[in-house]
Amino acid sequence: MYKKLLIIPILGSLLVGCNADNQEKVEKEEMKTSLTYPVTEEGNDVDTIFDRVIADPYRWLEDDMSDETAEWVKAQNKVTFDYLKEIPYREELKDRLSEIWNYEKVSAPRKRGDYVYYYKNDGLQNQYVVYRKDAEGNEEVFLDPNTFSEDGTTSLGQLSFTEDGTLAAYAISEGGSDWRKVIIMDAVKNEIIEDTLIDVKFSGLSWKNNDGFYYSSYDKPKGSELSAKTDQHKLYYHKLGTAQSDDQVVYGATAEQKRRYVGGSVSKDGKYLFISGSVSTSGNELSVLDLSNPNAKIKPLVTGFDQDAGVVTTKDETFYISTNLNAPNKRLVKTTFENPTTDNWVDVIPETENVLSISKGAGYFFAQYMVDAISEVKQYDYDGKMIRSIDLPGIGSAGGFGGKDEDEVLYYSFTNYITPGSVFEFNPEAGTSTDYWKPEIDFNPDNFVSEQVFYTSKDGTKVPMIITHKKGLKMDGKNPTILYGYGGFNVSLTPSFSVANVVWMENGGIYAVPNLRGGGEYGKEWHNAGTKMQKQNVFDDFISAAKYLKDKNYTSSDYLALRGGSNGGLLVGAVMTQEPELARVALPAVGVLDMIRYHTFTAGAGWAYDYGTAEDSQEMLDYLLGYSPVHNVKEGTSYPATMITTGDHDDRVVPAHSFKFAAELQKKNTGDSPMLIRIEVNAGHGAGTPVSKTIEQYADIYGFTFYNMGVTELGTTK
């Protein structure tokens, strides 16, 4: 399928620049270089859906385990890295990223048993280390994921303790895979006490007293991940001292309990097991099992999948539930075990005009609201009486305030685009905050500005966007700008600090993040406005953000880059194929790019709430074909300079999406711009990526972007 020796010469313009009046391109003869791509052989695969015949010439690339695909990956990476190594400031970017990244980072602490646990990274460690202190303040390493593998690609996932802190279970991911292994420990002795559990996926770890814990998984496929069946998630109970093969299926064993996602959580008193079941990434049913009664049956709390509902905490037989049922922006309700139906629900914190998320600690609820994607926090008692609004350190994102009812202090984090993440100690009785930990970093926020604007999308909808850059930057339309977006799955993009973004902005770059429809910034209605047959709203919001930046002279097409990952990779792929002249650079990462077959790969069918599928109806098929990036690369079109990034064994958004898109662009693009794909080997969807690899990736992404905007040396434009 792959012909190693056949290459097609393509002239690639490495630099695009403008004269002082931005009227002429730099002479092409000074910039051209020979850029060759491997030929990607075309097969004869087709799909017939609703009598429509859809060609799929690169289907052979779906097998990420085949020798042919491995050879293709190797050849594509050679072209890409040969190109990247010619960028004169690539190493300079890498050095600066390493320099500024090298500062100590510490998480908020949490008390478990006789110890206080926290995560810490000395600076450039590939993975965060779990430390703990005893009552005398003696510090020791509890878990060091940097020792899990030689190359640093094995990462630590969830870490769960028993209520008394004497036992722990933690999950690890190898090579970025969503499949996990679970290791069980005597936490006091810091010793492994049982055989490792394997083949665990999309799972929590919730202890039932000290006897065992609940976890979730699917049946593991043999061979390629494409054969994985992810429509029957099962909740298991592992009893300590027994083999994994003897683990009991608690929920998901029957056809009536067929769910794509199932999770279990035990109440703090160990009396109740709450079971959540979903058929997609949005909406869930909720049930409860009385663990104190060996003959108890699972009792429904919320039926159907039209709402999100989760138990925040319990008090005796009263359940406190956060839900968007009849409350698109969410509310907190309470009900009882004896009569838990929705007819018996009582509002504790009613819905408001802002989206609510709830945490609890020290005997209080903390209502964290998003107000135009900015955090506001209010403290309530268990009866729903507001105690106070909490003064935060600034305008940005706050998270935390969680803990046990007996805790006397709580912790929360705060960040925004120019404030490195810091941890604060909160006194819930006095309502006061004090510094717990602040980073010492080579960055002065006083030299930067971050402002929120509102722009109008195509259909008149107002959309917020935060724009961040160095103070005093001249708005002449020539500033290198990254427009970053997501717009899906109810995910909210709230302000957060990034070392990588600092390096971009230090060199004259602008970083802009719009809160597109499809996200969760304004609740369920905002999310739904960017799903299925309304998905084009997301792309229009992104295009309108780009036009706003150009209209206000922040940048221009020659200095604009589009960036997004996963669902955001779809966003970039759709926009660059719909409006190829919109931007100079496109950076789709681990994107969902084949909208006709996405639901046939691994967990893809679970995304149908947002996307719909090609098999739903003729209308849905036509709509997906109208924007599917793989199917909308057109002959005779000049596309932006593109660098696709993916992992060779991503088992969430399989790399075939990116492989096919790259092949289409390399075949059909008629301009001089490079069409490259950078494939991280032995890597997945991104979680747990070693710091060293992350730095290399950013150096390549930023180097590629600056280079194709005509930047001859960092901090300047041509």
Image: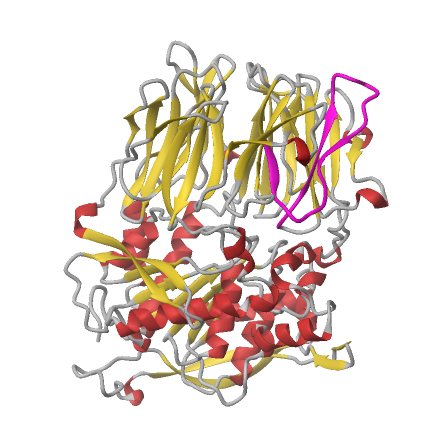
Residue 678 visible to the viewer: no
**Residue situated furthest top in the rendering:** 136
Q: Residue at x 57, y 48 (%)?
A: 176
Looking at the rendering, the stretch of residues picked out in magenta corresponds to 282-311
Establish if 144 lies above or below 655: above
* Front in this rendered view, residue 482 or 615: 615
Where does the image place residue 410, in percent across and percent down from the top left?
A: 40, 23
Q: Which of the 4 quarters of the picture holds residue 308?
A: top right
Residue 694 falls inside the magenta stretch: no
Where does the image place residue 685, in percent across and percent down from the top left?
A: 55, 53
Can you say which quadrant of the picture contains the C terminus? bottom left
Q: Which of the 4 quarters of the picture holds residue 533?
A: bottom right
Can you say which quadrant of the picture contains the N terminus? bottom right
- Compared across the picture, whether 436 is left or right of 138 comes to left
**Residue situated furthest left in the rendering:** 472
Q: Which of the 4 quarters of the picture holds residue 639?
A: bottom left
Where does the image place residue 587, in percent across and percent down from the top left?
A: 44, 66
Where does the image place residue 189, in percent across and percent down from the top left?
A: 56, 14
Establish if 34 lies above or below 98: below
Residue 304 falls inside the magenta stretch: yes
Q: Residue at x 29, y 43 (%)?
A: 395
* Front in this rendered view, residue 311 or 500: 311
